Each structure stands twice: as C-alpha cells, then as structure tokens.
Image (cartoon, rainbow, N blue to C red):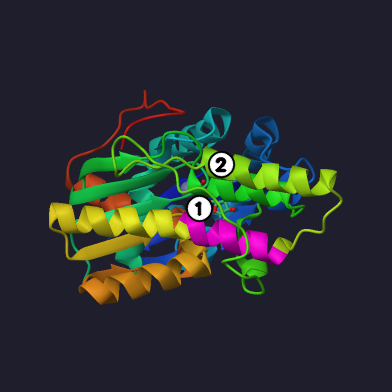
Amino acid sequence: MKILSIETSCDETSVAVTENGRRVLSNVTASQIEEHKLYGGVVPEIASRRHCESIVSVTDEALRQAGIELTDIDAVAVTYAPGLIGALLVGVNFAKGVALACGKPLIPVHHIRGHIAANYIEFPELEPPFLALVVSGGHTSIIEVRDYTEFNVIGSTLDDAAGEAFDKAARAMGFPYPGGLYIDKASKNGDTSKYKLPYPKTENEYDFSFSGLKTAVINLIHNSAQKNEELDINSLAACFQNTVCEILVDKTIKAAEKFGHKKIALSGGVAANSGLRDMLNERCSDVGIDLYIPPISLCGDNAAMIGCQGFYEYRAGNVAGSDLNAYATKVI
Ligand code: KG4
Ligand code: ZN
C-alpha cells in the first residue's frame, strides 16, 4: 500500500511516499527555519503562507523521487493535530483535495503518534508494546505505546516542552533560533559541574516542568551581567543540557521499571540531542532495556513518519471524511 503523506504542523512543509508503513520511497522537506530565525521564533502567519506556497512543489518532488504518479497512490495521510492551526489547515485542505481528486481514502494522523512511528521506519523489528519518550519543540511526554493506535500517557510537561526550554535558554545565551542544536554543540566544550541548576519537583513523578530551569539560566545570565562577571557560556550550555537530560532520562527509566517495559523508543526533534542519546543509551544498557532512537533525519518534523503511522491508522479503520478539521491541541 503506497501512502502519500503530508506534514505542515509547524515550520516544515514535508511530503513523503511510504510503502506498507515502513518503507520510505521519498521524504521531501522544505524548511522555513532561515526565515523564522530573523524573528527569534516561528511566526505562525508566515508559516501558513510558506506552506501554502510550497506544498504543491514539495508534493511534485516527493512523487518524482518516489518514481510514481499521483494515480499510483492508495491513500493520503495528513497531520491534523496538534500544531499551529493555520499551518495545519494548509496541509489538511491540500490532503482533502488530493484524496478527493484521486478518489482515495484520507487518513488523519496525530503528530505525536507520527514522531513515535519514526522508530518503525528505522527498526523493522520494533513492535508495540513499548515505552516512548517524545521530546519536541511543543511536547514532552512519556507514553505507553500499547498497540499501534493505542496509547497511555504516563507523564507530560506542565509548562515548557523540552525543545521550548532549549530554545528559550539558548536565546538568553545569545544563540540563534532554534537553539537546541547550538546548546548541543556548545556543551561539548563545557564543564557540566560549573553551575548549579535546580532539578524541579512535580506532583506526578513522571510529569516534567522545565520553566524553572529556564528561568534559573536567565537569572544567572542577568546576575553576571549586572556584576560585570564573565560567564562561561559553553559550561552554562553543558550544565543546562545535562540537567534537562538527567530529568528526561531519570523519569523515563523509572517509568519503564514501574510499568514493566523492556523497550524504550525515543523520538521528536530533541531526540537529535547528542547528550540525551548518550545518557539514555548508557542508562538503558545499565538496566538491560533495549533502546531505539531514529536517525537524526527522522527526529525532526517530516512526512515519512506521518505516512508510517498513517498505514497503521488505516489498518485500524481510522479514516476521515471530507469534513476533517485541524486541531491546535488534541490528546494523543
Ligand atoms: O519535533 P520538532 O522538529 O518540532 C516540533 O514538533 O516541535 O522539534 C523541534 C525542536 C526545537 O525546539 C529544537 O531546538 C530541538 O527540537 N532540537 C534540539 C536539537 N535539534 C533540534 N534540541 C536539543 N539538541 C539538539 N541537537
Ligand atoms: Zn514535531
């Protein structure tokens, strides 16, 4: 079954062709990052307009790279939630048009389900049940993947998502948007014991709270500026990254042990973080848990992961009518 999939939930216009869920025939992404960088973050209206401009050419290129015609596809999958509403609406309406024109089914895909499915592409042997840690710019959750379309959220962020905290802390450190990658790079030359940062407590031990940590970084920067003290940005980046990673890894391992999971799958844009990949890898091997991490190319937003999850949604009978809507927020 060949699925044409469309992802426009934030600032990447991405279209892919996948076969039977796990085989990627093409995965084409037009990133808007350079434009949003000028404003220090994603400007929703600009994101919608750029999706509108590039969706047709990105689709043409995805079909060309897959070596197929539009008439060869069996279904259209699209991210319908959660994300920037104007951005989502571009993808949803375009997908409806394609499905209608081709007379093929339309499959709605939840963005976070898609991130988790990135692991199926890389690891053909991976099947539910397993525990997922999803860390992106908009989401941070520990989720039990009971089946391909059955999920149980164990913990989520109460305020900033991990990627959001990375980006805000990076901005205060003087790095461009999106700052996660810059913190990752700077950390390699920093000392993780130089600055003391708080380890936030949450009522549900599997929930996350990163805003206090972000504020602590901002305060540290302001205080040293007031005292005219020089700050070691590499070490501050290393301390911040290390603390975020410790929180993510501690809670995920605890959840795996408590809920009896022997497999953990990491996903989302922050899964590209080298510190997180290394720390989770080390801790998982210490306690005998199999760890799955997608390649960097499948960590950020892309349509291949949507096509992969779309296949399993279709198999479960989750097909949308022509009245499909987009939602800025929606539980998984
Ligand atoms: O999944 P994603 O592409 O978009 C959302 O669905 O939100 O994630 C984007 C986030 C941004 O916050 C970005 O800074 C972060 O992923 N990110 C990183 C790294 N690469 C991307 N964060 C930390 N370290 C990285 N290497
Ligand atoms: Zn995402």
Where is residue 146 shown, x and y percent of the image?
16, 50
Residue at the limit of the structure toward the left, as seen here: 260
Q: Quadrant for residue 51, please give it.
A: top right
Measured along the vertical axis of the image, is residue 209 above or below residue 301? Answer: above
Q: Decide: marks 2, 1 in contact (CB < 8 A)?
A: yes
Q: Does the stretch in magenta take in 236?
A: yes
Q: Is residue 154 left or right of residue 42?
A: left
Measured along the vertical axis of the image, is residue 235 above or below residue 5? Answer: below
Q: Nearer the viewer, residue 317 or 160?
A: 160
Residue at label 1? 301
Residue at label 2? 10
Where is residue 250 shown, x and y percent of the image?
34, 58
Q: Nearer the viewer, residue 9 or 217?
A: 217
Judged by its main secondary structure, the magenta piece is helix
Residue at 20 percent across and 74 percent down: it is: 288
On residue 45, which mark appears? Answer: none
Q: Quadrant for residue 282, please give it.
A: bottom left
Q: Which residues are magenta?
A: 234-244
Residue at the limit of the structure toward the front, as seen here: 227
Q: Is mark 1 within 8 Å of ligand 1?
A: yes
Whether residue 193 is visible, yes or no, is yes
